Amino acid sequence: MALFRNKRDGRSIVLRPVHAFGRRPSACQTVLKAPDVSQVHALVRWNSLAWEIVDQSRNGTTLDGVRLPNGRWTALSVGAEVRMGLGDESAWIVQDLTPPVTCLFPGQGHGLPVALNPRETLLPDAQQPEVNVYFHEGRWMLEHIDGIEHLNDGAMVSTSRGAWEFVLCDDLESTSENAVASSAPKTADVALHFDVSQDEEHTSLSLLADGKSVSLGERIHHYTLVTLARVRQQDAQRGVPPQSQGWIGLDDLSRMLGVEPSYVNIQIFRAKHQILNALPASLGEPPLVERRRGNVRLGDYPFEIRGGAHPM
């Protein structure tokens, strides 16, 4: 990805495939407030082979001190200085010129970008996940404790340990759509088999995928899943329509489990992470737990519950 570093404050910005600099917020990805900067001062673009810049201003743009010809594209090089005004706040050092890529960029412009895995990107880390960013049906999605939403370019992704700007580059979006969405999983090919001890203290899970059984062992988050499975099973026995089966408020679920909602959210992410990594990559990400408006439910999977103090 292309990175420019501001000469005055040291913050970095990541460039979109076509990136405008200037004073007009509605037209520019990077807004410059200096009075000698034009409404749209300069454009930088990726031409499929290299990054290049063109001046669009009245007062001019310089590259390493040489004024650019207005309206003519000029190739950029790493380490070059691009100046769009007299002050250092309008001067940028070319930091990186690799091809554009969809990513999460630190909100304050200091730090390293986060590369996105189309199947799953847990933040702030996989040990204590609070949100998940992934690619599904042609769109990038953000999953958090309150639900799932589409990510648009420039959206902020926040956790207790920091915030990132979502940078969308169309080239990766189309590539990911072909590579991932075309191989979306069929839920009928995956089944969950739970084994619960009589005292409800231990829950093991086996995954049946494409006719093969994979033991996922005993984990705390398996009890969260089996609780969701029981809610769905009870609804089915009461004759609740399939589209409405299994939904439970996150607060209600946390009370059933005796933990905080944020901890339930972490358990859900851990369960999805474990199962996703146990499946072949060609299957993509299964909708293990669905969300809507503060409610969650187990996805539309066949399951079996053996043992436990509350057999169904």
Image (cartoon, grey):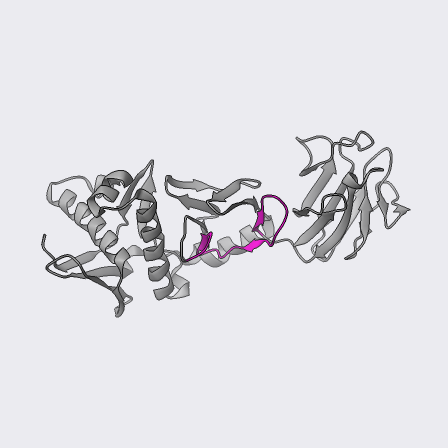
Q: Nearer the viewer, residue 136 or 28?
A: 28
Q: In terms of image quadrants, where is residue 95?
A: bottom right
Residue at left offset 25%, top offset 43%: 254
Q: Quadrant of residue 283?
A: bottom left
**Residue 113 is one of the magenta-drawn residues:** yes
82 w.r.t. 302: above or below: above
Residue lying at the far right in this picture: please name it.
Answer: 66
User: Could you say where residue 35 lies in the image, as x and y percent from the top left?
Assistant: 80, 29
Magenta span includes 120: yes
Q: Is residue 144 left or right of residue 65?
A: left
Residue at position x 80%, y 44% in the image:
54
Residue 300, image x, y percentages? 26, 50
The location of residue 157, given as percent across then percent down, is 50, 43
Residue 197 visible in the displayed image? yes
Using the image, determine if residue 197 lies above or below residue 240.
below
Q: Is residue 176 left or right of residue 247?
A: right
Q: Is residue 287 visible?
A: no
Residue 49 in which image quadrant:
bottom right
Which residue is nearer to you in this view: 186 or 28? 28
Residue found 58% across the figure and 48% down from its top: 106
Image-based side of 149 in relation to 212, left or right: right
Closer to us: 278 or 309: 309
State the image coordinates of residue 96 (x, y, percent, origin top left).
71, 56
Q: Is residue 151 above or below residue 188?
A: above
Q: Which residues are magenta?
A: 102-126
- Which quarter of the rendering shows the N terminus? bottom right
